[in-house]
Amino acid sequence: MDVERDGLGVAVGIFAASTVQERPLNRHRIFTITGGRTGTAWLAALVGENSGCVAVHEPIGVDDIGTRTPDIRSLRHFNTYGMTPVVEQFWRTKFSLLPDVPEYFESNHILAKAGLVEALAAATSDDRVTILLLRREWDKQVSSYLDRDDFRSAANVWQWYLDPAYPRRIVDPSRLTRFGMTGAAIWYAAEIEARQEYYRRLYGDRFAFIDCTLEEITTPAGAGALMTRLGFRPDPILPKRRNANTGRPNQERIERLRRLLARIRFDPVESASEFIEAGGSLHRPAAVRTD
């Protein structure tokens, strides 16, 4: 399959066959880059209940995986080979299924791990795009993964998170592998923050990037500030907790995590900058694949 590619190696015109070109211009599309277990369900409720925006969390119905949410094959392709025809086909389908509304918000954290930003940049659309860089305090975020055994099953990691063994990664996981699942979860949190900075640096002139943390936006002042930046009502009513772990937090584990995290030096801006300056790319295929 021959495709024309721009200077960053992203396929140009890959959405020509979709209906996206027939839609009205000047719509607002809002997405996230975040790790999951970071308040995405709550955030979708905040936006949906306090605006006229269509707000979606994660489309994971029987017919949604592979069409509205990336499946394992697309995720593994992107993080192994880059923006291949398999991944491009997913995005053609995904964008063709977006509702034709003035404002659309999707907090689905899986999208960015399958080339969301690259696909938005390649789309033949004049939509206004905002991307929320959502973070959470690592001790609570990583503890949430461990409480659920999220990094025990390879299939679970491939569908919802990132595998440290992927060849396309920004952060070197080698220092953390001896800590088992805890190390994998910490690496993942670091990789997501490095990817946030990677995309901000490469696409900051194309899209609006907004920094926010779960700890801030779950307060009245923080929620109001975020909603104002998104163009919505500045005095939102905060929704109840969504998709939270049902058990009591393992405080002993959290304390151990804090001691371990205190020994780790990590700068996401520095990591992303070094990766880019060394010629690294998450999406540029070494060779165009057709399988």
Image (tube, grey):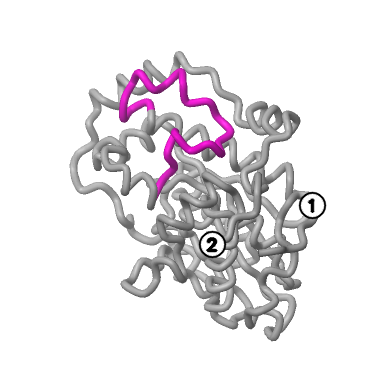
* Residue 221, visible in the rendered structure: no
Residue 77 is left or right of residue 268, and the answer is left
Mark 2 nearby-residue class (10 Å; few <14, some 14–19, many ≥20): some
Q: Residue 119: x, y in percent? A: 64, 61
Q: Where does the N terminus fall, quadrant-wise?
A: bottom right
Q: Per the image, is 173 magenta?
A: yes
Q: Which mark is residue 275?
A: none
Q: Residue at x 51, y 75 (%)?
A: 54
Circle 1: element type: loop
Q: Which mark is residue 205?
A: 1
Q: Residue at x 57, y 78 (%)?
A: 96
Residue 248 is left or right of residue 175, and the answer is left
Give, as a single range, the part of the protein colored magenta.
160-183
Taking the view exactly as shown, the residue that stands out farthest to the left is: 247
Kindly identify the amino acid type of the residue bearing the numbered disc 2: Val
Mark 1 nearby-residue class (10 Å; few <14, some 14–19, many ≥20): few
Q: Residue at x 51, y 52 (%)?
A: 77
Residue 156 is left or right of residue 166, and the answer is left
Kindly identify the amino acid type of the residue bearing the numbered disc 1: Asp
What secondary structure is the magenta-colored segment mainly? loop
Circle 2: element type: helix
State the separation of the CA atoms marked 1 and 2. 27 Å
Question: Is residue 278 depicted above or below 59 in this figure?
Answer: above
